[in-house]
Image (cartoon, grey):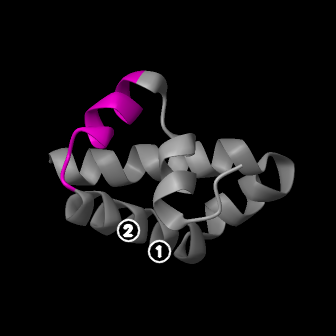
Amino acid sequence: MPTDAIGRFMAALDPGQREAIGAKPRAEQEQLAAAWERELESDDELDTLDELSPPAAEAEAARRVLHREAG
C-alpha cells in the first residue's frame, strides 16, 4: 500500500483516471493529491463513509477533486 500522498491518491482513482493523472507533471499530481487530502479532512460526509469503507471514502474524495479540476 502506498504511503505517500500521491501514491494513496493514485490508488483511490479508477484505472482510466490513474493513467491520465500519471501522465501529468509531478507538480500537478502533488497539487491534486493535496486537494484530495484536504477533501478527506474537511468533509463530514466522507468521515461517515470512511467509518464504513475507507477505500470508498478515498475514491469519492478523488472523484470530487477531479470533478472540480475539470470544471
Specify few, some or many for label 1: CA neighbours under 10 Å numbering under 14, 14-19, or 20 or more: few
Give residue 18's position: percent from left, percent from top.
Answer: 40, 34
Farthest residue to the left: give it. 71
* Residue 5 appears left or right of 68: right
Give residue 11's position: percent from left, percent from top.
Answer: 56, 42
Specify few, some or many for label 2: CA neighbours under 10 Å numbering under 14, 14-19, or 20 or more: some
Give residue 16's position: percent from left, percent from top.
Answer: 37, 23
Tell me which amino acid carries mark 1.
Arg
For this rendering, which residue is in front, 16 or 23?
23
**Figure quadrant of residue 70:** top left
Q: Kindly identify the residue that appears in the image at 57 percent across and 54 percent down.
A: 8
Residue with the mark numbered 2? 35
With respect to residue 19, does 26 lie above or below?
A: below
Mark 1 vs mark 2, CA separation in Å: 5 Å
Q: Kindly identify the residue that appears in the image at 23 percent across and 38 percent down.
A: 23
**Figure quadrant of residue 35:** bottom left
Residue with the mark numbered 1? 38
With respect to residue 50, does 24 lie above or below?
A: above
Task: Please say whether residue 42 is one of the residues in the magenta stretch.
Answer: no
Label 1, secondary structure: give it.
helix
Farthest residue to the top: give it. 16
Label 2, secondary structure: give it.
helix
Q: Kindly identify the residue that appears in the image at 73 percent across and 52 percent down.
A: 49
Q: How many marks?
A: 2
Q: Main secondary structure of the magenta part?
A: helix
Tell me which amino acid carries mark 2.
Ala
Give residue 5's position: percent from left, percent from top.
Answer: 51, 65
With respect to residue 2, does 16 lie above or below?
A: above
Q: Which residues are magenta?
A: 16-25
Q: Kindly identify the residue that appears in the image at 30 percent across and 57 percent down.
A: 29
Asked if labels 2 and 1 touch by Cβ distance under 8 angstroms, the answer is yes
